[in-house]
Image (cartoon, rainbow, N blue to C red):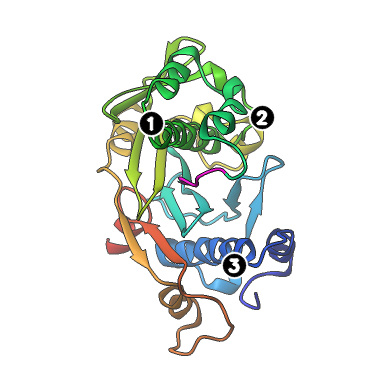
Amino acid sequence: MSFLPNHEYSSITRFVKLGDQKRALVSRLLQYALVHQVLEIPFDEIIIRRTPEGKPYLVCDDMKLAFPNFNFNASHHGDFVAIASEPICLVGLDIVSHSVPKNETAHEFIQNFSSYFSSSEWYHIMHAGSSDEMLHIFYRYWCLKEAFVKAMGTGVGYKLDDVEFHHTNWNNIFVKVAGKELKDWKFWLLDLGQNHSVCIARGHPRTATTSYRTTLKRIEFDDKEYYNGFHLPNASFTFRTVEDLLQVIHGADRVPFDISTKCDVSEDEGSEGARFVQQ
């Protein structure tokens, strides 16, 4: 943790299990590495804070004009840690490991979350088929909902049963909130490794929560500028090991602290981070 500012330590040590601490540590390191690579800010000058709801944001008054609304989001669960960023739109990211519940059936486990789904979503989950198929559909819907509320900067306190996702075989995904379709949102749902789903949500800055909106450089854009940001290419991922990440941060071949390299690290390469590193 010596690479990170002191205020980041508690966000890592609050986890009890060592595996969770490692994932949280890699998530924080990935955020600083992304900012360094995309915006070319020296590591010792990077300041990342969090809103009261917990969404990270960069404190920077000298933002490049090519990134008028640079923002990012990270997630970690199961075997992966990932990050995504956007130059104009809001971005939300969520990873879900399709874990099999213990000491209860899949149906009993899913029933605990019934209040978070619309009647349509619940129907598709309950009629998916086998227990494994039910879990698969449940986790996919959950991943979409999490990415959506994370993009806005809210969290699970949002009334998730009002958020209803529609799709065609998990493509052409769109969302309705309180029955109204949100036209200025896009979603990508991808398989990541074995038994993991990852969702990236992209939306208009004006839909951000009040606290998160104050961290953004701009809320309104003209039609052409927003169109270009909204229709950037579909997201994809570059896979990196922890050792790769540490070399970016440390600038050397040696690994300065003990952390398992079995945990893969993903950095988004679509419209987000690596796309602009290449430019």
Question: Mark 1 or mark 3, which has the lower sequence index?
Answer: 3
- Identify the disc placed on residue 197: none
* Secondary structure type for disc 3: helix
Question: Mark 2 or mark 3, which has the lower sequence index?
Answer: 3
The answer to whether residue 149 is left or right of residue 14 is left
Q: Quadrant of the C terminus?
A: bottom left
Q: Residue 5: give x, y in percent of width and height.
A: 68, 69
Residue count near mark 3 (Cα–Cα under 10 Å), binned few <14, some 14–19, many ≥20: many
Please name which of the two marks, 1 or 3, marks the residue nearer to the observer. Answer: 1
* Secondary structure type for disc 2: loop
Question: Mark 2 or mark 1, which has the lower sequence index?
Answer: 1
Q: Do the residues labelled 2 and 3 touch (CB within 8 Å)?
A: no
Q: In which quarter of the image is the N terminus?
A: bottom right
Residue drawn at point x = 40 percent, y = 45 percent: 198
Q: In which quarter of the image is residue 181?
A: top left
Disc 2 residue type?
Gly
Q: Residue 78: give x, y in percent of width and height.
A: 50, 55
Is 278 inside the magenta-drawn segment?
no
Say above or below: 80 vs 160.
below
* Secondary structure type for disc 1: loop
Say above or below: 44 vs 151.
below
The residue beneath circle 2 is 157
The residue beneath circle 1 is 130
Number of numbered tags placed on the structure image: 3
Residue count near mark 1 (Cα–Cα under 10 Å), binned few <14, some 14–19, many ≥20: few
What residue range appears in magenta?
97-101
Disc 1 residue type?
Ser
Please name which of the two marks, 2 or 3, marks the residue nearer to the observer. Answer: 3
Residue drawn at point x = 44 percent, y = 19 percent: 121
